[in-house]
Image: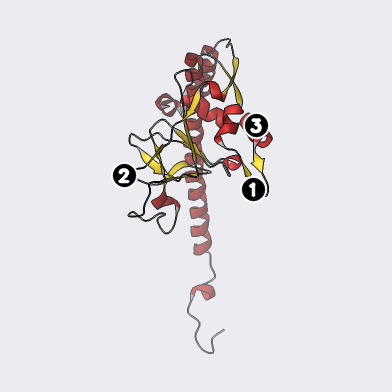
């Protein structure tokens, strides 16, 4: 990811990404069920530990409740024994909203807690989490959610449905290379978008100043009685 930042703006940045793609070589992929490499990992907060409460948003993944909700979310002294404790390196998703992207990966260094409504899981050593994260954001997974979710008015994709889902995976080493490549591309896109937003803001600011300087004198003078 840092290399992606360094190559931004250089004429050979696209070539650098292409070289990384070539390093992947010819991959051997294996079709696997999620039940083979993930397990439920949420632990009940039975001791009502004073851990920070998080939610999972559609756009940003794990977000502190204090930032997600205007009222700060669940009050600090509320009983949270029913909440799940989530360890770093775990995934969590809302089974009623995963179809619109409500899934997150906890990359913090400390445990947090989430509502018991969430499904919490982690992968084993045969899966690279970054590779899996990007795959979970693809149309391939979206189609499996659509096929396996169940319910009436509201549809749910509970953990047992995730276990029935399948994914094509190369070796862990190759997964790591692919995950790193997508992270690098993500970083490049983010930096380019920030630069575009900065330039766009500058253009609009200049346009506003020009329009202000060319306002008719009559439009910026205070209106006086009897003066038109």
Q: Which numbered disc, 3 or 1, marks the residue that appears first in the sequence?
A: 3
State the CA–CA distance, disc 3 to disc 1: 17 Å
Mark 1 surroundings: few (<14), some (14-19) or many (≥20) residues within 10 A: few
Examine the rendered structure and indicate whether residue 83 appears above or below residue 105: below
Residue 185 visible here = no
Disc 2 crowd rating (10 Å Cα; few below 14, some 14-19, many 20+) is some
Q: Is residue 151 above or below residue 206?
A: above
Of 32 and 176, nearer the camera is 32
Q: What element carries label 1?
A: loop
Which mark is nearer the camera, 2 or 3? Answer: 2
Residue 52 spot, x, y in % from top left? 35, 45
Which element carries disc 2, helix, strand or loop?
loop
- Residue that badge 1 annotates: 154
The residue to which callout 3 is attached is 144
Left or right of 77, for residue 197? right
**Do the numbered discs 2 and 1 sit on residues whose CB atoms are within 8 Å?**
no
Residue visible at 64% across and 29% down in the picture:
140
Badges 2 and 3: C-beta atoms under 8 Å apart? no
N-term mark: 2 or 3: 2
Q: Label 2: which residue?
A: 49
User: Does 204 appear above or below 38?
Assistant: below
């Amino acid at each position: 990811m840092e290399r992606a930042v360094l190559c931004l703006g250089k004429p050979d940045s696209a070539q650098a990404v292409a070289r990384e793609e070539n390093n992947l070589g010819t991959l051997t992929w294996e079709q696997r069920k999620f039940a083979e490499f993930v397990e439920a990992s949420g632990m009940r907060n039975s001791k009502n530990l004073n851990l920070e409460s998080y939610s999972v948003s559609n756009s940003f993944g794990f977000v502190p409740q204090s930032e997600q909700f205007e009222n700060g979310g669940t009050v600090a002294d509320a009983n949270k024994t029913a909440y799940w404790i989530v360890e770093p390196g775990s995934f969590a998703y809302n089974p009623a909203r995963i179809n619109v992207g409500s899934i997150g990966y906890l990359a913090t260094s400390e445990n947090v807690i989430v509502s018991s409504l969430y499904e919490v899981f982690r992968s084993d050593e045969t899966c690279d989490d970054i590779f899996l994260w990007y795959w979970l954001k693809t149309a391939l997974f979206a189609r499996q959610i659509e096929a396996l979710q169940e319910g009436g008015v509201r549809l749910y994709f509970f953990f047992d449905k995730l276990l029935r889902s399948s994914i094509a995976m190369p070796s862990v080493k190759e997964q790591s290379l692919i995950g790193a490549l997508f992270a690098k591309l993500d970083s490049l896109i983010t930096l380019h978008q920030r630069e575009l937003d900065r330039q766009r803001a500058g253009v609009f600011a200049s346009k506003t100043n020009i329009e202000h300087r060319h306002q008719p004198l009559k439009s910026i003078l205070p209106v006086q009685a009897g003066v038109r």
